[in-house]
Image: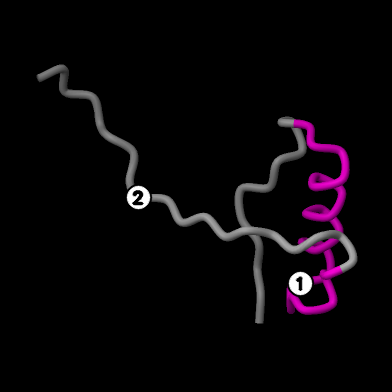
Amino acid sequence: MSGSARPGPAVYRLLPSLSGYGTLRLNGTDESLLMRWQRLGGEEGRPTGVRAE
């Protein structure tokens, strides 16, 4: 074995369209960052997590 650590499991959730964000209950800052990333699609702005209530 190489001894390298394997990444843990990840959870993915499909996002609504930009017009469907009213159905989500995200923290305001996280919501705007997520919407910007979804609209622009750049790897540099990809969120690593969001907070929700």
| Residue lying at 87% horizontally and 38% vertically, measured from the top left | 40
Q: Nearer the viewer, residue 37 or 5?
A: 37
Magenta segment: 20-42
Determine whether label 1 and label 2 are within 8 Å by CB: no
Q: Where is residue 4 shown, x and y percent of the image?
A: 23, 24
Q: Which of marks 1 and 2 is nearer the N terminus?
A: 2
Residue under label 2: 9
Q: In the orientation shown, which residue stands out farthest toward the top?
A: 2
Label 2: few (<14), some (14–19) or many (≥20) C-alpha neighbours in 10 Å = few
Residue under label 1: 27
Q: In this view, does 1 lie to the left or right of 19?
A: left
Q: In the orientation shown, which residue stands out farthest toward the bottom?
A: 53
Residue 19 shown in magenta:
no
Residue 38 shown in magenta:
yes
Q: Where is residue 13 shown, x and y percent of the image?
A: 57, 60
| Residue lying at 79% horizontally and 37% vertically, measured from the top left | 41
**Quarter of the image that includes the N terminus:** top left
Task: Identify whether 10 is placed above or below 40.
Answer: below
Q: In this view, does 45 lie to the left or right of 32?
A: left
**Quarter of the image that includes the C terminus:** bottom right
Looking at numbered disc 2 in the image, what kind of residue is underneath it? Pro
Question: Which image quadrant is residue 42 in?
Answer: top right
SS class, disc 2: loop
Q: Where is residue 23 shown, x and y percent of the image?
A: 77, 79
